[in-house]
Amino acid sequence: MKEKKSTPEKDGSGARKETLEKITEQEREEYYRERRRQRKLLRQRQVRRRKMMILGATAVISLVVVVGAVRGITGFVAGRISEADKAETANQEQAGNEAQQQENAQADLLAQADLLAAQYDYDAAVALLEGSEGYQENTQFQEAVQGYQETKATCQSWPLEEVTHVFYHTLIKDTSKAFDGDYKEADYNQVMTTIDEFNKITQTMYDRGYVMVSIYDMATANEDGTMTPGEILLPPGKIPFVLSQDDCCYYHYMDGDGYASKLIVDEEGKVRNEYIEDDGTVSVGDYDVVPLIDRFVEEHPDFSYRGAKGIVALTGYNGILGYRTDISYQTRPDDLDQDKVEWLDNHPDFDLETEREGAKKVAEAMKAEGWLFASHTWGHQNVGQIDLDHLKTDTGKFQENVDPLIGGTDIIIFAFGTDLTAQEDYSGDKFEYLKSAGYDYYCNVDSSQYFVQIRDRYFRQGRRNLDGYRMYYNPELLEDLFVASEVFDPARPTPVPPMS
């Protein structure tokens, strides 16, 4: 039996040597060929492995490079696109803003024109829109102009001799203080009006078609001292009237009696009142004729003819509008009345110029809102009784202490409801003096519905008092304005004391 040869591949080195010595030359060559083949295969595998590693690394590097390049290109493109988008967006926003601004400007302009038309100034409303840029292409403006013109065509010229004039004194805010049984209650009950009554009267007159007009709408004072009748054009159903308020000074004697203490200009530029509460704190609100009318016209612009408000008649001896503006507060003459002495003692920081600046600020704000000022004489004088010298002295004090704060005035509203004369026409020394002092418009108190004179050298009008006395004793004289029983404040004591 032939002996089987062993294979040297798995032997150790010694065993492999021993085996090689025992095999033939041919077998030895075959062995070494096989070894070479195995090594070659190993080398090939190693080469392939290294190539794969190199290729893998190259692929990774390439991928990184490619990714980076792509990101760079993408970022660049995105950046360029983003910049373009931003520019386009900015252009769109700018165009949108400009369009919105133009739209807002047109809306504001139309609102201004509507307000002018609502207050019966149709010509001004038309001129505002027709003079605007792009009017020929703006159909909305054109339609509005057509409407204004159509409404104006319905207006009628109101007879000036049929324009009534109503007036109030300072309004009562707290009836429990005004009607508290002291010695002042009777006077308050006769000549004052409560806020509740005033608001009801105002609303009723508005509902009946009444429209506030300016005394300047009724007549114009020319530079040569002559007067020219005016014209008031109103649509059917509207009735003109003049409004005034006497003694808007907030006198010392009224302190603590339920009245406002002064007029102020608030943070919004609106005229309002201050009111001193029982604990000494100060409330701000609408507690008198001026701010109440301002607020009412804000809600009902058609209650005012071309922006007109009322006339505020001022004395000067206690200052004006609640400010202690008279020179006597600073000079403290020997005959200074006790009310002023007590007030000065309670206000050691008083400064005349500060008071005057405060009053002037309020006066300017009021005039900007359509209010006019009138002299009520400096010392609340009865011009029908005082002599000419007294009248001159009093007028001089008004011109010195009040006129500079209100910008002067050519209107005089006589205190105590009196008049210069009982004659049909003005004449005489007092009239000539007041005319020379710059007064062209004169108002007294008259219970009749109308009293208007437009003469060559003056305008004269009677006024109707809307107060406790008139509502209680002569309600029939007020029926063209309101029903007295519907506005009479139940807090008002009755009977109202008769006039002595």
Image: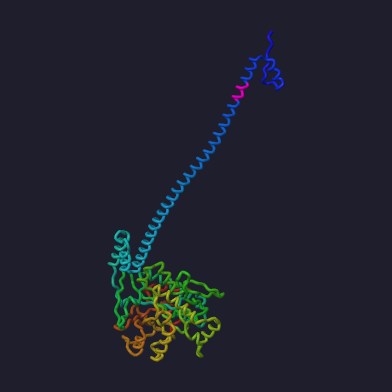
Q: Is residue 52 magenta?
A: no
Could you say where residue 483 lies in the image, as x and y percent from the top left?
A: 39, 72
Q: Residue at the spot x=37%, y=60% of the render?
A: 102
Identity of the residue furthest to the top in this view: 1
Could you say where residue 380 lies in the image, as x and y percent from the top left?
A: 43, 85
Could you say where residue 307 lies in the image, as x and y percent from the top left?
A: 37, 71
Q: Is residue 37 magenta?
A: yes
Q: What span is in magenta?
A: 35-41
Q: Quadrant of residue 100?
A: bottom left
Identity of the residue furthest to the left in this view: 153
Closest to the observer, 144 or 184: 144
Q: Would residue 229 appear left or right of 493 to someone viewing this image?
A: left
Q: Which quadrant would the C terminus be assigned to in this image?
A: bottom left
Q: Quadrant of residue 201?
A: bottom left
Q: Would residue 409 appear left or right of 335 to someone viewing this image?
A: left
> In this rendering, is residue 334 above or below 491?
below
**Which secondary structure type mostly characterizes the magenta part of the structure?**
helix
